[in-house]
Image: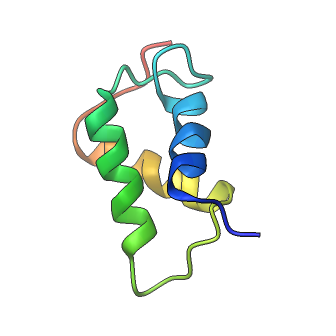
Amino acid sequence: MQMTKPEFYDYCKSFYGTGGIYEFNVPAGVLKSACALVQQRKDIPFDGDTFDRERVRDVIELLGYEVTK
């Protein structure tokens, strides 16, 4: 079952948002945009799984954010 946009955002936030497992201290708007970019890619299927979450991490790292804890 594919995740909805809000579910995928919450999933990524639990890893990369404030208080997340790998806190990047990334603003909510930036994280939402990174999630949307991954969800809208046409060259790979979106499943809302670990691979997609790690693609979001790649985007926020490219934007200059780093793990803070």
Q: Residue 31, relative to residue 56: is it above or below?
A: above
Q: Quadrant of residue 11?
A: top right
Q: Is residue 63 left or right of residue 21?
A: left
Residue in the image at 57% along x and 50% along y: 8
Q: Report whether 65 appears left or right of 10.
A: left
- As rendered, which of 68 and 41 lies closer to the eye? 41
Check the image and tell me how it is coloured.
rainbow
Q: Is residue 43 above or below residue 6?
A: below
- Percent across and percent down for residue 29 are 27, 36
Residue at (35%, 27%) from the top-left corner? 66
Q: Residue at x 57, y 21 (%)?
A: 20
Against 14, is 6 above or below?
below
The spot of residue 42 in percent (x, y) is 40, 86
Q: Is residue 3 left or right of residue 57?
A: right
Q: Nearer the viewer, residue 8 or 52?
A: 8
Measuring from the top left, give residue 17's x and y in whole percent.
46, 25
Q: Quadrant of residue 41?
A: bottom left
Number of labels in the image equals 0
| Image quadrant where one finds the N terminus | bottom right
Nearest the viewer among 56 and 32 is 32
User: Residue 15 in the image: x percent, y percent?
Assistant: 58, 31
Residue placed farthest to the left in the image?
Answer: 63
Q: Residue at x 22, y 43 (%)?
A: 63
Q: Residue furthest bottom?
A: 43
Q: Is residue 59 above or below residue 3?
A: above
